Amino acid sequence: MAVIDRIAAFHPEMTAWRRDFHAHPEIGFEEVRTSAIVAEKLQSWGIEVERGFGKTGVVGVIRGRPGNRSIGLRADMDALPMPELNEFEHRSTYENRMHACGHDGHTTMLLGAARYLAETRNFSGTVHLIFQPAEEGLTGAAEMLRDGLFEKYPCDAVYGIHNAFDLPLGTAAIRPGTVLAAVDYFTITLKGRSSHAAAPHMGLDPLPCAVQLYTALQNLVSRRMNPHDTVVLSIGQFHAGTSQIVIPETVEMRGTIRTLLPSVRLKMDELFHQTVHGIAAAHGVEVTLDYKRSYPPTINTAEEASAFEAAAREVVGEELIKTDLPSLTAGEDFAYYLEKAPGAFMLLGQKTPEHGNVPVHNGRYDFNDELLPIGASCFVRLVEQQLGG
């Protein structure tokens, strides 16, 4: 493992930063403390800073030797609205707030890279440091773009890193093409007419409609979609009724759809609407469908994926490069940047026998601090290789 010596030297400081972020998690668009710390550190290293970008985002600018090219490096800062189950000293100090996806580590890795790049400036051109809010379902990337991110801070290419709990420490998974899925959300409300449970014929029970609809939506995937096309449809919430002896007035179902190809996404959208409205009509219940398109698929461009692979190889070595990663059905709002600029998103393994092997979005998750200097070094080598000369 060829971690940069200078970054290895301040690894203990990075660990302290990361654990402080972990102990003080902030959810999307509420990252006031986190963004303030990020901005203060960047400014202390002589980096130009703009705060309040995309509501609570921070953009830093490092200028090297004269050059016309620029690279964007992105880290997400937000936590999740969930309780932490860990008992270690740096556990969350806030109720129902937790860094359960490693964004505390992503922020720290980019800070480590920023510190080194500001000290050395061993590149030609400009590096834009994008500390983004609200990745967890609130499309903070889209908010930064609406604020004119790439107009004010143009990037010839943009790059991001996410930790991977299921890959050995230092494994760099990177390839061109679709690496993460498009994400859509839905809420279905079925309204019937309430009645006494002993006289269901006096009302209009929405539950039979909801049960049939649940099954029919699963059949969309298994019977209407090409089995070679990856589609996941999951219903995570099903709410109805308040009493054992009352037919409920309404049923609400909430869930998500994940697809890898734009054409498949369009087809699922069409079939989903047909099925929901058709079954509701057959049962005579009113239906309200709130269908929200969220993240597009994360699609790495070939040249930039190759560049990130080369940078990672210099840090972790050939044996830890993984280019056969299958497309994952998780989503990432980094995809919005890739719709506007070339770039690549890389997964870095953090699993060891002792640490880093708990899945993300789990109350016992924790980022493995051993990954901090590895990720920071990958960012630095990428900049020096792509903006060399």
Image (tube, rainbow, N blue to C red):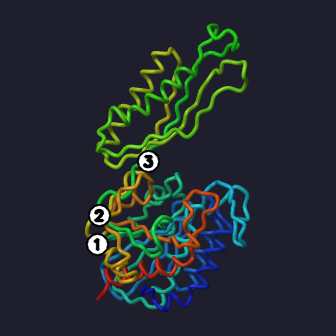
Residue position marked by numbered label 2 in the rendering: 176
Spatial separation of the CA atoms under disc 1 and disc 3? 26 Å
Labels 2 and 3 touching (C-beta < 8 A): no
Quick check: 12 left or right of 349?
right
Mark number displayed over residue 325: none
Task: Tell me the kind of residue under disc 1.
Answer: Ser
Please tell me whether mark 2 sits on a helix, a strand or a loop.
loop
Looking at the image, tell me whether mark 1 or mark 3 is earlier in sequence order: 3
- Residue type of the residue flagged with mark 3: Val
With respect to residue 13, does 204 lie above or below?
Answer: above
Check residue 306 in the rendering and tell me which mark sits there, or answer none.
1
Q: Residues within 10 Å of mark 3 (few under 14, many from 20)?
A: many
Of the image marks 2 and 1, the number of the one nearer the N terminus? 2
Secondary-structure class at tag 1: helix
For the C terminus, give its image quadrant. bottom left
Give how far across and how far down residue 179 sits, in percent: 36, 58
Horizontal and vertical percent for residue 194? 66, 16
Q: Is residue 65 above or below residue 249?
A: below
Q: Quadrant of the N terminus?
A: bottom left
Name which quarter of the figure residue 367 lies in. bottom right
| Furthest residue in direction front, as rendered | 353
Q: Secondary structure at mark 3?
A: strand
Q: Which residue is found at the position 68% from the left and 60% from the top? A: 84
Residue topped by disc 3: 183
- Check if mark 2's residue and mark 1's residue have beta carbons within 8 Å: yes
Above or below, 21 against 65 in this view is: above
Q: Amino acid at mark 2?
A: Pro
